[in-house]
Amino acid sequence: GLNDVLAEYTVKSNNDRIEYLGMLGLFGSLISFIIQVPLLERDRVSILLSIIMESFFEDSNSTEGPAIIIQLVWFLFTMCYFYIAITVFLSKNDATILNLSLQTCPLWAVLLTMLETSEKRMNGLILPPTMFFVALAMVLVGMYLYESRNEIDHKNNLNECN
């Protein structure tokens, strides 16, 4: 939530989506490849690299290497599109609407999973943990409190930021 609010402030106050995307890409890459990958994903990266090297440089009929590369390229493409779409959305709308839509995705996934598993099981629904409902209630209460603020106060806060 805080990330989206800060992104909204940056995009709307500077009116420069390109700079925001550039800094997000630069610092995101630095943090990911210098800190996270060596510390947390070293074993998995070495396994992926060995599979890719084996499928390309040895005489094998394995299709795992090209499939991994295609999946990584697709992931990069979708993440770039996602962040570009978010900056376009935040330049025209509020971060609250973005957070509300992003928070409803897990809700729909849980509801559809509950319905799908209830059809397979005869003894009823499988409910998610109670913390899911606590988190959902907190999101809804937070949205209500934020949206119940006076619109004039919200516009004054935006004018003070500029």
Image (cartoon, rainbow, N blue to C red):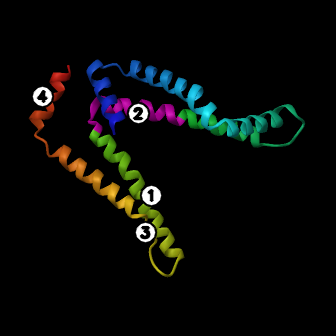
- Could you tell me residue 100's position as x and y percent? 31, 47
Cα separation between marks 1 and 4: 38 Å
Instruction: Return the disc, 4 or 2, that comes first in the chain's sequence.
Output: 2
Check disc 2 and report the residue beneath it.
85
Q: Main secondary structure of the magenta part?
A: helix
**Type of amino acid under label 3:** Leu
Where residue 127 is drawn, which disc sits there? 3
Instruction: Return the disc, 1 or 4, that comes first in the chain's sequence.
Output: 1
Q: Which residue sits at x=74%, y=39%? A: 47
**Type of amino acid under label 1:** Ala
Position of the N terminus, as image quadrant, is top left
Q: Is residue 135 above or below residue 62?
A: below
Nearest the eye: 141 or 71 = 141
Instruction: Return the disc, 3 or 1, that comes first in the chain's sequence.
Output: 1
Q: Is residue 5 above or below residue 140?
A: above
Residue 84 is covered by the magenta coloring: yes
Q: Secondary structure at mark 4?
A: helix
Label 2 crowd (10 A; few <14 / some 14-19 / many >=20): few
Q: Look at the numbered discs 2 and 1 and tell me whether their residues touch, using CB distance below 8 Å.
A: no
Check disc 1 and report the residue beneath it.
109
Closest to the camera, between mark 3 and mark 2, is 3
**Type of amino acid under label 2:** Ala
Cα separation between marks 2 and 1: 22 Å
Nearest the eye: 39 or 64 = 39
Q: Which residue sits at x=38%, y=59%? A: 131
Residue at far front of view: 39
How many numbered marks does the figure carry? 4
Q: Look at the numbered discs 4 and 2 and tell me whether their residues touch, using CB distance below 8 Å.
A: no
Q: Secondary structure at mark 2?
A: helix
Instruction: Return the disc, 4 or 3, that comes first in the chain's sequence.
Output: 3
Check disc 4 and report the residue beneath it.
156
Q: Is residue 81 above or below residue 162?
A: below
